[in-house]
Amino acid sequence: METKVKIFSCRASYYLAHKIAECYGTDLGKVTVSQFSDGEFQPSFEETVRGSDVFIIQSTFPPADNLLEMLLMIDAAKRASAKEIIAVLPYFGYARQDRKDKPRVAIGAKLVANLLISAGVTRIITMDLHADQIQGFFDVPVDHLYGSSIFLPYIQNLELPNLTIAAPDMGGSKRANSYAKYLKCDIVICYKQRKVANKVDSMTVIGDVEGKDIVLVDDIVDTAGTLAKASDMMIDKGAKSIRAVCSHPILSGNAYETIEKSSITELIVTDTIPLKKGYEEITSKINVLSVADLFADVFEMVHNQQSISTKFII
């Protein structure tokens, strides 16, 4: 008997899960969430999942209830005798805590991995982890997708005459170098220093940007301070235009206003994290590309035990 595929969503990613299910050619599974007066909640499946491949979709951006809801859904699927429980985390929260960068701190990414494993996942599907080594935190298969399969065709279609890829910091140089190799163009690197998190103290650029159409490549845009400072600096050094591609638009604080005031021509992001309602009234510079088709295709490949390597451009 053929194993059924059932796709469910937690509340924070319903907007994306609905699109993924539509691309897959099915309806989202029925879930209800009971809410207690003190804020405690209890999700439940309103249809059988026994013997099914269950895909549970949720990006684990703050608040922490988003992660907790995913864990409760996984536990419910396990206790309801699902055959496979695949946690789909388009954005893997706490990924920036992937190591001890100073004494007496937690490794949050490893803790989240342990929680997901303890809850009962049999596979993880995620996209553009902040650090590739996070895959090693899991003792189950991890399908790590790349936003490059969406961004690279878009960049090529722009047909920029003097295209140059830029890394916003030293940590992003590997990703930027992969883009530059594929596009056969030059690369420049921004060197930044921070005294506190989320605040750039100083920045300089390594490489020639004069007359270039710059595309900054990063995995996360949070406060947008780095992108704004980098774009303004490169325009001052003679760059012709500045664009940025970032997979996960956290966009906290005054990020939308920062982007609007900056020298960035266009910020291209995906829909792994929902943007603030009415953001178009603050800035028209943000362009959202959907990951729904990519995830739907991977669901099909995973269910049929096919290789997903065809989805990797770089």
Image (cartoon, grey):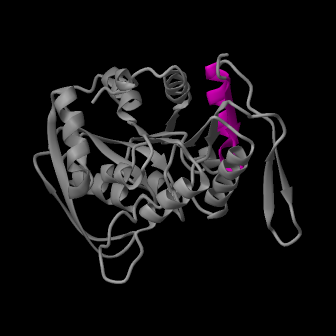
On the rendered structure, is 16 left or right of 217?
right
Relative to 107, residue 195 above or below: below
Pick the residue in front: 60 or 234: 60
Is residue 277 at least partly visible in the picture?
A: no
Picture coordinates of residue 91 (x, y %)?
A: 50, 48
Quadrant (top left, top right, bottom left, bottom right) of the C terminus: top left
Picture coordinates of residue 10 (x, y %)?
A: 70, 46
Q: Residue at x 69, y 41 (%)?
A: 9
Is residue 225 at least partly visible in the picture?
A: yes
Q: Is residue 22 magenta?
A: yes
Prevailing SS of the magenta stretch: helix
Residues drawn in magenta: 4-24
Relative to 154, residue 253 above or below: below
Pick the residue in front: 2 or 185: 2
Residue at the extreme left: 207
Q: Is residue 86 magenta?
A: no
Q: Residue at x 73, y 49 (%)?
A: 76
Residue at the extreme right: 37
Pick the residue in front: 243 or 138: 138
Picture coordinates of residue 40 (x, y %)?
A: 79, 66
Picture coordinates of residue 213 (x, y %)?
A: 24, 36
Residue 176 occupies quadrant: top left
